Each structure stands twice: as structure tokens, then as C-alpha cells.
Image (spheres, rainbow, N blue to C red):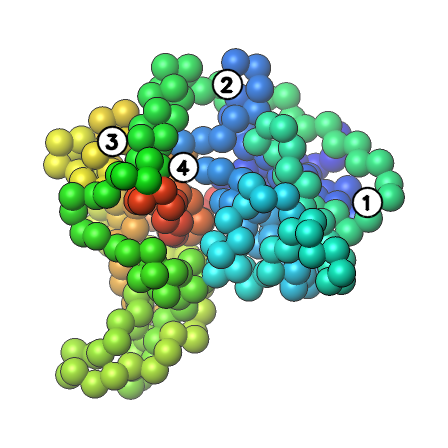
Amino acid sequence: MKEVIDWQGYLAMFDEDALMIQSPFTLDGSIAFGSDSDYTTMAIAGLQLLFSRGIDITSVRSLPLVNTHAVKAATGVEVMSDEENDTPCEWNLLVGEEATLVFTNNLERDLAFHGPADLEALDPTFAEDMAAAWNRELESTHVSQGAYVSESAYREGANARLGLLAQHSGDALVWPPRQLDKHGERIPTANQALMARAKVESWTKLSAAGAPSEFALRAPVLGGIQTVFVQFEQGPRGVFLVADDAEYDPSIGDQVSFVVRRIYAQEGLIRYGMKAIPTN
């Protein structure tokens, strides 16, 4: 078996000109996604792992199980469909039947990955309740009773939020992006990438009854919603949810990193965003 890499809450294995990335969980004997993961979040993690190895990718061809807008916002990589065969594309993203993806630039060779055997089994009742909550949240008629974010507003801010792009305001960096500074002056477009690491300055856990309505369907299943208030090395501060599928009880002074996960769904569209996980 190839070396197994623990990366952004997933397990990854390299083999010459290919990368396999999979969930660390099983359900009834099959590999299964965690509470807030899917093929899109896994694809983003895989691309970021390839980038960390010095592999430059500008486009990848994939089956339609990946949210192309979220992948482009988080990584800058264009996701192309099989119908766009006339456009050159060196890399391919192969979606497995279970919670597994393979990136390869050579479809001619056999890919023989043997993943790790010691995966964590999900509680079937918990997994069923979470799936039911997400399905209800994804209904086209479901609209949060709290802060409403339209699809156009979400897409407009996705690049800066998923890419952790800050704005220059005088000598300081501002994140998340906004139109005006504290003096009412317009701030330039976000273009400064923050390091995806920060220090926990405070944390809180909202009870299921006290969680915002965006999370009302899932908060009871999760036993509440965990958040951290952090400061980045470059200065900005922000509040982040802790990844649902990360076993982490935060403490002040902890170092955390950030991964893309499902945040919530509204009007049939999943909103993706950054969540915190403990730094390895």
C-alpha cells in the first residue's frame, strides 16, 4: 500500500501520475462522506494537495457530481464536462461509486490503489438523521428564517470567502471583504490571499435551540454548533464554524487551519465555505 496522507480531513495516496483521495469514514461497510463533506469539498482538497506538491493544474475534466463554481472559487481551476471534448484538458477527475476521487493525467494506465483498512465507522442512526436533515434543507422551497443570502450574493462573494482573499485598507488587511471601510471609504477588490492558518482567541458552542435558523435542521443531530474566533498571522480576525466531521474541542491559543465544507443549503443550492480544523 502506498503512503497514506492525512489531508484536510481526508485520506490521500499518490501513485506516479495519479492521486486518490477518500473519506476516512465507513457506513455499513462502504466508504461514506462525513457530515459536511461531499465530492465538491473533496475535489477542492485534492487540488490543493496537488498544488502543495508543485503540480500546476488550470483545468480538469470531471463528471457532473462536482460544483464547478465552488471549485473554481476555491482553487482557480476550471472544471470541464465530458461534452467539452474539443477543449484540451490534461487532468481528469474520476468519481468513484463510494466517497472516493481519483485525479490522473494518464487514462491509459491501470490505476491500482489499495486504501487503508482502519477507517472510522459512522453511527448508522446519526448518519441517517444527518442525511435526512440535509435532504430537507436542499428542498427548493426551503428558505432560512434568519439572514437570507441570495444565490447571486453568495456567488459574488464566493471567490474571496473560499479563497481567503483579503482587501488592503491603508496598512491593514480586511477580511471578510466589504464595500466600505470604517470611514465609509470604498475598499479595493480583495486580492491578498491569507495564510490558511490562525490562532484561536475565543470559542463558543451554540445549543441546538440557540443555533441560527440556517442550521436548525442539523444542530439537534450534531448536539449544537461549534464556532471559533481566530486571528490570522496577517492580522484579520473572523468567526468560523468548526468542521462537523472533525473531532475537535477548541481551546484558546490553539492553531487551526481551514478547509472547504458545506455550510448550509438554501433554495436547493449548497453554500460552501471555510471551516476550522485543528492543525496537524
Q: Of callouts 4 and 3, which one flags the residue occurring earlier in the amino acid sequence?
A: 4
Q: Which residue does the image show at 52% across and 26% down from the upper left?
A: 32
Count of numbered tags? 4
Disc 2 to disc 1, how far (Cα)?
Answer: 30 Å
Circles 4 and 1, Cβ within 8 Å, touching? The answer is no
Q: Disc 2 on helix, strand or loop?
A: strand
Q: Position of residue 195 (x, y in %)?
A: 44, 63
**Image-based side of 172 in relation to 247, left or right:** left
Circle 4 crowding by C-alpha within 10 Å: few under 14, some 14–19, many from 20: many
Q: Quadrant of residue 135?
A: top left
Residue 73 against residue 37 in the figure, above or below: below
Disc number for residue 27: 2
Q: Nearer the viewer, mark 4 or mark 1?
A: 1
Residue 89 visible in rendering: yes
- Kindly identify the amino acid type of the residue bearing the numbered disc 2: Leu
Q: Which mark is residue 36?
A: 4
Q: Which residue is mark 3?
A: 217
